[in-house]
Image: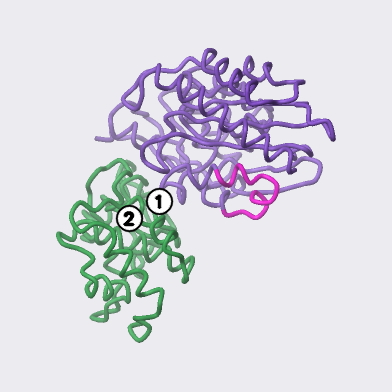
Amino acid sequence: MKKELRFTVNGEAYELYVKPKSLLMDVLRDQLGLTGAKRSCDTHTCGTCTVILNGLAVNSCSILALQANGGEVLTVEGLAEKTKLHPLQKAFLDYGSFQCGFCTPGMLMAAKALLDKNPKPSKEQIKEAIDANICRCTGYNSVIRAVTAVVNGEYEEAK
Amino acid sequence: MIRDFEYFAPKTLEEALTLLDKYRDNRKIIAGGQSLLKLMRHGLVNPQYLIDIKGIFDLNYIKSEAKKGLRIGALTTHWAIEESPLVRNGFSILAEMERKLAFIQIRNWGTIGGNLCHADPAQDPAPVLMVLNATLRTVSLKGERTIAVEDFFPDYLQTALGPNELLAEIQVPTVPSHTGTAYTKFNIIENDLATVGVAVSITLSPGADECQDIRIALGASAPTPMRAKRAEAVLRGKKITDDLLTEAGEVASAEAEPLSDINASEEYRRQLVKVLVKRIGKEALTKAKQA
């Protein structure tokens, strides 16, 4: 039997009916059409499904949708303000921080969660924040460079 | 594929206990679900009823009192524990353990109570809590019980909890003076599960440098987290030397009952226990001398 789920996604309030076994990722992708969070390992190992729930980075593949009841979710679709990209998105473009792009939404959300908690992280802390996010083509250096550029204020005007 | 189940999300402890009493069979309790959902996805656990206690606010807290020591609500997340000044001051081994427990996404949502109740022998909290002499407070409709962490794991993936009982609180007594504690785990990928974990606590007699009390606990070295009591006996009451630490490592390696699995063979784990007990024993000793 479906149950009621009330939550906010990217600033918009939703009232849905979901199966108790539905994962947060299933609801975001299949019911709301937000396909930024990727389904990959399905066992919270790869980080491509990372979203921000109540201010913290979580794996949407490993949380029941109903556990987000009353919560606030931010997905990669909510990062930009209309056509204005988020500083992290701009930096990822400028620093060539992706090739195939599959891991990018997860990387962006992990980096965003870090900067929300700690606007001036060290390189070590940046590495730690994305160490659960697996990239199989670009590697991590360009991602670290992009996040560092945002930390150093290169994208102040973009905020 | 996760099979369908009936879902309950009690908001209070009393509501949860009533549900536990009502649904005793084919039922699972979920907190952060970071271990359980994996098992459910693989079809290894297929509950008919799922009781989601993650939303019980009353079990999410960290308190510290001079007399009682540290008290952590079972539904406190790993991240909240590692960030807590109460934990960092006086129980830093616990904060360090939590920081290496898993990736940040898991630590943000997973709870210490859920981790303990999953009863994986490779978990990090149990060995650390064992050397800290921690106890667990459980609740049911009938009342409360207190169980030492070392008595909480009867067998592989099993706990001492009764069918209508819930883990409510982790109680960690104040660390005695002249005590040093240390924990490490060996693994291939950082922040992954332990291939072997070793925790040691050493209390020295004031001024005499004699080992007054010692606790050694092992993770992923038996079907359950375990205390290496025979290895402790090698060091208790003595002035600890390198040779004695080597002997303690050998004894611990012999009393461990490691399983072979995809991560390591039994022999490899015994070797790790031998090396790590000595290494971490030495670290705890150095800290105890400075304390």
Residue projecting furthest to the left: A100
Q: Position of residue B66 (x, y in %)?
A: 80, 45
Does residue A88 appear left or right of residue A70 in this picture? left
Whether label 1 touches label 2, CB < 8 Å: yes
Can you identify the residue that label 2 sits on? A50
Tell me what residue is drawn at x 28 percent, y 31 percent: B42
Q: Amino acid at mark 2?
A: Thr
The image quarter in which residue B129 lies: top right
To which chain does the residue with label 1 belong? B
Which one of the lettered chains is coloured purple? B
Q: Is residue B84 magenta?
A: yes
Can you identify the residue that label 1 sits on? B105
The image quarter in which residue A56 lies: bottom left
Q: Position of residue B116 (x, y in %)?
A: 53, 32
Q: Position of residue B265 (x, y in %)?
A: 36, 19
Q: Colour of chain A?
A: green
Q: Position of residue B188 (x, y in %)?
A: 36, 37
> Observer-nearest residue: B244 or B220?
B244
Q: Secondary structure at mark 2?
A: strand
> Observer-nearest residue: B115 or B212?
B212
Q: Is residue B137 visible?
A: no
Q: Secondary structure at mark 1?
A: helix
Tell me what residue is drawn at x 55 percent, y 52 percent: B80
